[in-house]
């Protein structure tokens, strides 16, 4: 790969594509990531409300869904931390 190389119209973000290839990702995976809408927008995350806005019951259900153990003994703050670090 040549730094600053233009990979043509099939790659939206050449710089990101090259960085991902240097990290060892396959050409296909690097292209998918570099061409995703999320990567070009510069924003992370989805459209869900922050966990702080969820009820404790909603947090508990989400923790159950992703398989967090000991969730029944957790406070709202502990559930939020567990979900963020799972």
Image (cartoon, rainbow, N blue to C red):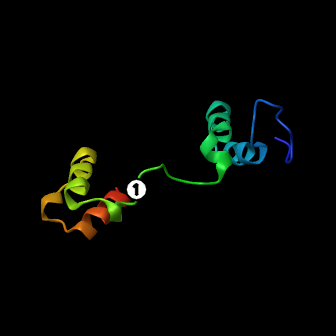
Q: Nearer the viewer, residue 2 or 84?
A: 84
Read off the residue under disc 1. Answer: 49
Residue under the point 20% across and 68% down:
75
Instruction: Inspect this view and state whether residue 85 appears.
Output: no
Name above or below for residue 39 compared with residue 54.
above
Name above or below for residue 9 compared with residue 79.
above
Residue under the point 28% across and 46% down:
66
Hey, which residue is sitting farthest left in the picture? 73
* Quarter of image, res 36: top right
Residue under the point 86% across and 43% down:
2
Q: Nearer the viewer, residue 64 or 31?
A: 64
Name above or below for residue 75 compared with residue 66.
below
Tell me where residue 19 appears, x and y as whole percent.
71, 49
Q: Looking at the rendering, in which quadrant would you find the C terminus?
A: bottom left
With 16 as the anchor, is 52 left or right in this view? left
Tell me where residue 68 appears, x and y as whole percent.
23, 53
């Amino acid at each position: 790969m040549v730094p600053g190389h233009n990979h043509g119209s099939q790659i939206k973000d050449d710089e990101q594509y090259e960085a991902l290839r240097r990290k060892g990702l396959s050409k296909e995976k690097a292209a998918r990531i570099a061409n995703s809408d999320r990567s070009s927008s510069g924003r992370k995350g989805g459209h869900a409300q922050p966990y702080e806005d969820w009820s404790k019951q909603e947090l508990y259900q989400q923790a159950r869904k992703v398989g967090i153990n000991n969730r029944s003994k957790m406070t709202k703050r502990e559930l939020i931390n567990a979900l963020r670090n799972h």
